[in-house]
Image (spheres, rainbow, N blue to C red):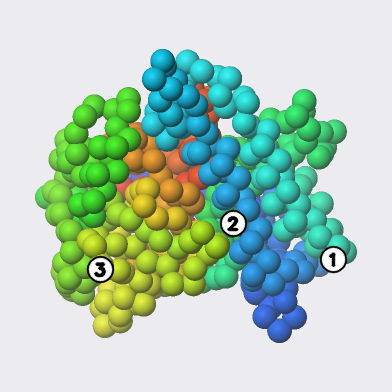
Amino acid sequence: MTRELPAVVTGFGEFIAREYDRPRTVHLWISENIASGEYLVRLWGSAIPEHGAGGYLGRIKMDPLEADALIEDLRWEWKRLVLDHREVQGPDRTAVFPFSHQWDQSSRPELLQGLAYGLVDIGFVTYSTLFRGENKDLQRLCAVLDRALRRGQQVISIESESLIVPWGMLYTPPDVCHDPPTEDHWSYEGFWGYRHLIEHTFSHMADFDSRIAVPAAGLTVGLCADPRIDIDFTRASFGVRKGVYVDLIRDLFLANGATVVIRTRKSELARAFRDAKFSDQIVFFCCHGLAAGPDGPTHRPYFELDSNERIRGRDVKNWLATGSLATRPFVFFGACNGGRLASIFYSTVGRALLRDRGARCLIGPQLDLPPVLAVTYSRLLFAEFLVSETKLGDIVWHLTCELINKHNNPLGLMFSLYRGIDIHLWRTDGQ
């Protein structure tokens, strides 16, 4: 929530000062050192003790292919344990995928309890492989990081152009007595996305402002939709009012007084991004995305708004080469079944969108997003974001916790926030 400071009475009336951006308590800066097959890591922040002995710098002894494989293993386990969890029900032995077909599992807590330790284990293995290597400097850095993460909720910013991890899925034991975790001793508090506010950032964005100004005429939302998404929704519309996915998302924004512009072709998106009068404050993608095939990540990720119209990072760069998105919109990627997302998608397409001329913030899933959850998550997130000045990072964190605590659904952990913990709508007093 945007925190209001005490009012100051002056000769011109009452002035309310607002604090827009909170300090990040943990900063991780990670850079690929190609020559020696390693990543350099720096750690600092208000949660990190300073003793005058210098900063914390370590080396992750891992090349990009090893890193890709590690992250792919994390995703594969989540897909296997959660999205592909299969049950046979009824006399006709119908196959049902509970977490893909029904987002609310509050009546069946045993489902999440039965698979949660598998998620804990792969999250801990990924964290340990990255930060608990043999490099002594890295070990010292990791020990300090461990202590900071165990002290309470942190505001974490990870800056890297090359190593992009599903940070919310990582697991650090919240209690040193239960490190490593076991089936009998683990806690949801160990998941980074459950306990902490996390963002991944890229290089510095000039003139960055966490406030999205709401014009007097109201918000404009660009709904960029792949018509084939409706097929996915029809196949998996268990537990949600029957309807068309794109229509449900459109109605969500219309109900909150926004103007919705629907784009279903690559040419329409290109024209909009090149327009000097670009007016979208929010860009919502209902699309198919591809960044990984059966053999792992591909280095040619793309998304589609229509069949055979692939949109890559280079297309976005080209559209923004001579202009900029004047509104610096908030971009939400609702990439659904039919494609596999991976970190390389966000390091190419995502980074192209978040460069100096583009968006100020992006949210996207790290796995195929079940259509039912796509609709529900979008509704819950924007129901809060559109009607208050609550900051985006707080909403994402709250939803992650609520899905686990109330609905026994861990999939909130798979959403990643790219540069945007403090993003919020900004309305002037006259609005």
Real-space Cα separation, disc 1 to disc 3, in angstroms:
46 Å
Crowding near the residue tagged with mark 3, few <14, some 14–19, many ≥20 C-alpha atoms within 10 Å: few
User: In the rendered structure, which disc, 3 or 2, sits on the residue that comes first in sequence?
Assistant: 2
Residue designated by label 2: 72
Numbered disc in front, either 1 or 3: 3
User: In the rendered structure, which disc, 1 or 2, sits on the residue that comes first in sequence?
Assistant: 2
Residue designated by label 1: 135
- SS for tag 1? loop
Q: Residue at x 19, y 39 (%)?
A: 244
Residue designated by label 3: 309
Real-space Cα separation, disc 3 to disc 2, in angstroms:
26 Å
Q: Is residue 6 visible?
A: no
Crowding near the residue tagged with mark 2, few <14, some 14–19, many ≥20 C-alpha atoms within 10 Å: some
Task: Please state the horizontal and vertical placement of residue 247, each as a whole percent of the image.
Answer: 17, 41
The quarter holding residue 182 reads top right
Task: Please state the horizontal and vertical placement of residue 379, each as a whole percent of the image.
Answer: 31, 36
Numbered disc in front, either 1 or 2: 2
Q: Residue at x 37, y 66 (%)?
A: 302
